[in-house]
Amino acid sequence: MKTYLLPRLRDILFLSIFIAAILLGPRMLNTDGDLPHYLAVGKYILQGHLPPGNDIFSFTRNGVPIADHKWLSGVLFYLAYFLFNERGIIIFSAVLLAATFTLIYADGVQRSGTRWPVFSLVVLGAGVTSLHWISRPHLLTMLLFGLWLVLTERMASGKKVSIWIFAGLMLLWNNIHGEFIAGFLVSGAALAGWVWEYFFNRPNADRTVGKRLTITLAVITGVTLVNPISVRALYTVTNWLGNDYLMSHTEETLPPDFSQPRFYFLLGLLILSIFLLVMKRGKLPARMAFILAGFTAMALYSARNVHFYGIAAPFVLITLFSKDQLIQPLARLEDGFARIESNSKGIVWPIVTVLAGIILLAVLPFGKIERFSPGFFPVQATEWLKTHPQQGNMFNPFDWGGYLSLELWPRDLVFIDSQGDIYGEAFIREYEEVIALGNNWQNILTKYNVAWALVPSRWNITLALTQAGWREVYRDPTAVILVRGE
């Protein structure tokens, strides 16, 4: 067998992460209600509309200005859904994840000249981020974040990288996800590292590099205004982060709980980071130290930032390795892989991997479980509603709003969906009083002229509505539909 037919470690990495994502497909689709909402937005835009600047999916906030900075994500995910239903979403998500870590690996090999240390760090980082392997816009952010790290490091190390590449990436990122702010943090950390070197190690501080980093920050700041909602994109991010009530009611915004197994990868990478930094102290450039410190702090502050740490930490720690520092057995292993991989080029294996994944999902029974789960979403109830429309305003759960919008809009508008920043603290408190059957729950439903309710069959409100005179018109193992009595 000729060596160019053999997969490289990067190909094995791509294949492994791609397959892992495929196997996690049902979880990626059915973790929360965000994905169907993004699909509904993408569907709306692809029908020939501009990205919505006001809420169009709910009757409780209809017409209220919104900052939907994820509209392009919705378009991309809906295209995958349109072409290959839910399996298309899983394939798209798996490609994004595999490409992200393959990018970090390939750059790490180029910078360090090693393969196995880089491979091990990247795999551990992928394990850290698996906490957030959910089909949502942050998967696109992960790839853009990795690319931003690579390009920023090249610029900071004196290599020629066009500032307009950063402008183009930020234009894309700013219309994909609110986490485009991470690009600013990386560029800011690189500039802070240059300033540190300028004051404390001036021979290493190239003035041209400092100038280019400063101009890059200025340019991408201006680019963030080039989107359908302008400065409202920044307002949405800061408004959500500044509301303690909304933050405390979102599990992923809380700090990591290391007693839970899902955070063990994170704990392991943190411990390894400390060990490597102690053993190889003094070998990390200031800019890398700022990046690592910043994203470590973010991950410890909120679990929703863990995916950034899982990419940034391996990227930084790779800097501590070089081929000439490897022990002899590992050095020989590196030489062997270098010889084998010297004739293995191109993207044949990733392409074969993706095509095989598509074929297997289309042919094998496994592909049939890559669906919106009838146990999580009101799939059967929604199909019934398509032929048995109800009159008036509906009440629905937070996590079902996006799915109902995807399937029933514009005929039916939801009471609430998973975009908590649109509804605000006061309204969400009212919603929670209804589902908890607080003292004022019936008055709140009357306030919003709710005529019928689609609620989980296991919720206590089902019995409470029946006792209050509401009539049950539909029931399945997941959902119940009740209509207000005359």
Image: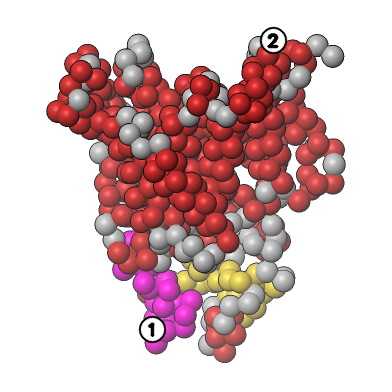
Decide if residue 64 is on the left or right side of residue 485. left
For this orientation, the residue located farthest to the front is 328
The reply to whether residue 230 is in sight is no
Q: Amino acid at mark 1?
A: Asn
Q: Nearer the viewer, residue 362 or 355?
A: 355
Q: In the rendered view, would you say 472 is above or below 176?
A: below
The reply to whether residue 98 is in sight is yes
Residue drawn at x 43%, y 25% is: 150
Decide if residue 472 is on the left or right side of residue 70. right
Decide if residue 316 is on the left or right side of residue 375. left
Placement of the N terminus among the 4 image quadrants? top right
* Rendering quarter of residue 419: bottom left
Residue drawn at x 55%, y 36% is: 122
Q: In the rendered view, would you say 429 is above or below 258?
A: below
Q: Which residues are magenta?
A: 422-445
Disc 1 crowd rating (10 Å Cα; few below 14, some 14-19, many 20+) is few
Q: Which residue is mark 1?
A: 440
Q: Amino acid at mark 2?
A: Asn
Q: How many marks?
A: 2
Q: Nearer the viewer, residue 215 or 106?
A: 106
Q: Is residue 287 magenta?
A: no
- Give coordinates of residue 116: x percent, y percent: 61, 31
Q: Which residue is mark 2?
A: 343
Q: In the rendered view, would you say 478 is above or below 47?
A: below
Distance from label 2 to label 1 (Cα)?
72 Å
Q: Nearer the viewer, residue 291 or 407?
A: 291
Q: Nearer the viewer, residue 219 or 331?
A: 331
Q: In the rendered view, would you say 334 is above or below 140?
A: above
Residue drawn at x 48%, y 46% is: 272
Instruction: Say what secondary structure mark 2 lies in.
Output: loop
Main secondary-structure element of the magenta-colored stretch: helix
Disc 2 crowd rating (10 Å Cα; few below 14, some 14-19, many 20+) is some
